[in-house]
Image: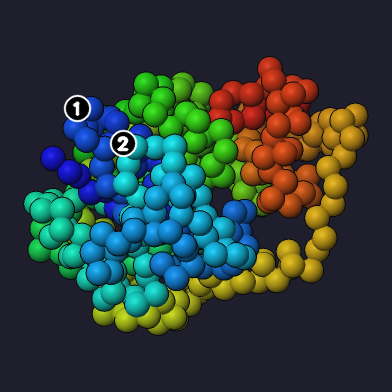
């Protein structure tokens, strides 16, 4: 029987959906994953999420829902990880388009659930920021989750809200989330990461990388993002919880505010009013800074390792980091991440604690 998993925030949530599908649906056909094409500036230099018009080669599932097959391509200058995900994984990845607001997204969900003949769906979020109120000072990317939460809440069929890896997105700490989490369904294991093992070698999602790392038994503290945030890698990391959708909607002020939205711009304005910012504004500002900066060439091997040593020495007690963090901390462009990763693995393969980088030089 076909299952539908809505990846609440897009990006790495879509990869985690494949892991969760493996854990919960061992003997069934791979789920359909409905997800944003919203890969942030590391992959996509254009701020905000992409819509169907930003791709070639999509396949219509319903009048307003399109599958992203492996041979689809984003229209330059946009970028997307979805075609490669579709090429490497057996799941169908369908595109959720927020440009007509929650009303448009609800229509897409209704069409898809009717087309697939579904009696229920799963809404999956990595980290748990979908459980936010909206005023938490550590919150960074509430808009995508709020939109999917609002759209799913308007469906006539049951929606199971799943949280994987509490706190691993670096937004709401696990301590703050515990009272908001529902019952634990299971704890992901190394076996559950195997279907996405090749994807983890190239996908930029830090939260998904840390989820897979904790499922594989890695513990410590991981330094992430351009600001060098430290995220604990604990036994809570690989857990999967079921939460109450109505409770989440009641708590999430932004999700309630965008329920009747008919455009992404309208939803953004609600985010500015409630949260004090729009994450797409942040992307716009960062993109403008990056556009004015020319990517520097990667250093020769001795200089590169010396640069790495300086980064590791200043890692403030972290035991691990991501290749995204290394790339940004060492001043390289996001497009150079995979090249930098390959060079570091050639020189220091013993520090690869897949899919993270193990930091050896930590100050006391």
The residue at 68%/17% (across/down) is: 350
Question: To which quarter of the image does residue 211 belong?
Answer: top left
Q: Badge 1 is on which residue?
A: 27
Say whether disc 2 or disc 1 marks the residue closer to the N-terminus: 2
Label 2 environment density (alpha carbons within 10 Å; few <14, some 14–19, many ≥20): many
Spatial separation of the CA atoms under disc 2 and disc 1 = 13 Å
The quarter of the image holding the C terminus is top right
Spot occupied by residue 300 in the image (x, y as percentages of width and height):
89, 35
Left or right: residue 291 versus residue 304 is left
> Does dot 2 land on a helix, a strand or a loop?
helix
The residue at 60%/65% (across/down) is: 76
Residue 210 visible here: no
Spot occupied by residue 227 in the image (x, y as percentages of width and height):
66, 52
The residue at 27%/47% (across/down) is: 32
In this picture, is 24 found above or below 328?
above
Q: Report the disc number at residue 20.
A: 2
In this picture, is 168 found above or below 98?
above
Residue 318 visible here: yes
Spot occupied by residue 126 in the image (x, y as percentages of width and height):
39, 46
Q: Report the disc number at residue 241.
A: none
Label 2 vs label 1, nearer the camera: 1
Question: To which quarter of the image does residue 102 belong?
Answer: bottom left
The residue at 28%/69% (across/down) is: 64
In this picture, is 28 found above or below 103?
above
The quarter of the image holding the N terminus is top left
């Amino acid at each position: 029987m076909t299952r539908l998993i809505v990846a609440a925030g897009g990006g790495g949530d879509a990869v985690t959906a494949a892991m969760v599908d493996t854990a919960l649906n061992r003997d069934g056909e791979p789920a359909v994953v409905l997800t944003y094409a919203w890969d942030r500036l590391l992959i996509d230099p254009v701020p905000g999420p992409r819509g169907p018009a930003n791709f070639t080669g999509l396949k219509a599932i319903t009048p307003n829902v399109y599958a992203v097959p492996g041979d689809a391509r984003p229209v330059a200058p946009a970028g997307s990880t979805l075609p490669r995900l579709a090429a490497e994984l057996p799941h169908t990845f369908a595109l959720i388009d927020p440009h007509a607001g929650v009303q448009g997204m609800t229509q897409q969900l209704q069409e898809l659930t009717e087309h697939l003949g579904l009696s229920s769906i799963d809404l999956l979020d990595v980290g748990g920021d979908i459980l936010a109120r909206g005023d938490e000072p550590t919150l960074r990317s509430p808009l995508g989750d709020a939109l999917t939460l609002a759209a799913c809440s308007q469906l006539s069929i049951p929606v199971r809200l799943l949280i994987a890896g509490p706190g691993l997105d670096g937004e709401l700490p696990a301590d703050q989330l515990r009272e908001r989490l529902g019952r634990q369904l299971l704890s992901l294991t190394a076996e559950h990461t195997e279907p996405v093992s090749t994807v983890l070698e190239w996908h930029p999602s830090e939260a998904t990388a840390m989820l897979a790392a904790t499922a594989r038994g890695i513990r410590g503290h991981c330094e992430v993002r351009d600001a060098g945030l430290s995220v604990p890698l604990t036994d809570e990391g690989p857990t999967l919880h079921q939460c109450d959708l109505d409770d989440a909607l009641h708590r999430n002020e932004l999700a309630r505010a965008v329920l009747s939205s008919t455009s992404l711009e309208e939803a953004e304005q609600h985010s500015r009013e409630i949260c004090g910012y729009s994450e797409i504004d942040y992307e716009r500002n960062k993109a403008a800074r990056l556009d004015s900066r020319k990517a520097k060439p990667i250093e020769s091997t001795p200089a590169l390792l010396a640069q790495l040593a300086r980064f590791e020495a200043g890692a403030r007690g972290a035991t691990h980091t991501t290749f995204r963090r290394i790339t940004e901390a060492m001043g390289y462009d996001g497009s150079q991440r995979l090249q930098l990763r390959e060079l570091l693995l050639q020189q220091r393969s013993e520090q690869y604690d897949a899919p993270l980088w193990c930091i050896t030089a930590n100050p006391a």
